[in-house]
Image (cartoon, rainbow, N blue to C red):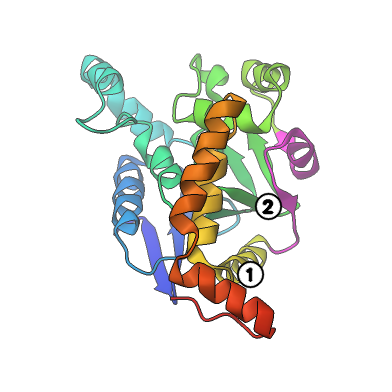
Amino acid sequence: MQQLNLNIDNGLATVTLNRPEKKNALSEILFEELFEVGRNLQKTEHLRAVILTGAGDDFCAGIDLKFLQTLLPRLEEVKVKMRNPATGELANWFQRPCYIWRQLNVPVIAAIEGICIGAGLQLALSADVRLAGPSTRMGIMEAKWGLIPDMGITQALPQLMRADQAKELMMTARILDAKTSEKAGLITRVVNNPLAAAKDLAKEIMGQSPEAVNGSKALIDQTWNLLPGSGLAIEAQIQSEIMGSPNQIEAVLAGMAKRPAKFK
């Protein structure tokens, strides 16, 4: 990989955007690598959690403007790609570098510092948890370029913000500091060292039964905006799949014996 680093250690994958000289802005290469790495992690055995972060002082400054300029001569081709996702895919070519992280069945934690705007914010919003440093600045900047955010924003923002707040943020292209972003729901917690905090959180999560962790993620993702009856049915479905599994039994036995669980 040219612009993305991947490290897997004992079930924890750390994915690092590696264009610090460009504030980790998304090039066409990085677009492809984000999707490919995410898709490969979907098939990685014994994966328990993922950390998404950026090299240097910033998480991601959105799409590289030079990349956008290369799209202008092939605009009609680009529009066809936007309207026609690949067979079997929900997300189109522009959406999939962000949406792929929502499709992982393991928890994804974003460790954020500095600039996190536009496509960078949409990438961060694809994570299950966002831990951000005091230097973090967030914004949905597409209106500045006469566009709307279209890289999966609709899949995340309704769960995090009121509609009026989302409209104001999108219509003004305003930049929010870390504390304001946290109050708005864009950040889970502001911490002094996001990467260290993400590793600590991943370790804590990985101490639980993998079926319970992955099932909890699936439960929230599938029911958050559903009618009550639909949510109850999904609760029952996921619980029935987990109940009585080896790791669930081990969790009970370990709890009763007051010893650390040994999950498979």
Judged from the image, the secondary structure of the residue bearing numbered disc 2 is strand
- Give neighbour class at mark 1: few <14, some 14-19, many 20+ (Cα, 10 Å): few
What residue is shown at x 60% (from left), y 73% (from top)? 252
What residue is shown at x 58% (from left), y 73% (from top)? 251
Circle 1: residue type? Glu
Taking the image as shown, residue 5 lies to the left or right of residue 24, namely: left
Q: Residue 165: give x, y in percent of width and height.
A: 72, 21
Query: Quadrant of residue 172 in the image?
Result: top right
The mark that comes first in sequence, 1 or 2, is 2
Establish if 58 lies above or below 6.
Answer: above
Establish if 102 lies above or below 239.
Answer: above
- Locate the C terminus by quadrant: bottom left
Circle 2: residue type? Ala
What span is in magenta? Answer: 176-193
What residue is shown at x 52% (from left), y 81% (from top)? 262
Establish if 193 lies above or below 36.
Answer: below
Q: Residue 9: give x, y in percent of width and height.
A: 44, 75
Which residue bears the numbered disc 2? Answer: 132
- Locate the N terminus by quadrant: bottom left
Q: In this rendering, which labeled residue sits more in front, label 1 or label 2?
A: 1
Which residue bears the numbered disc 1? Answer: 204
Circle 1/circle 2 CB separation < 8 Å: no
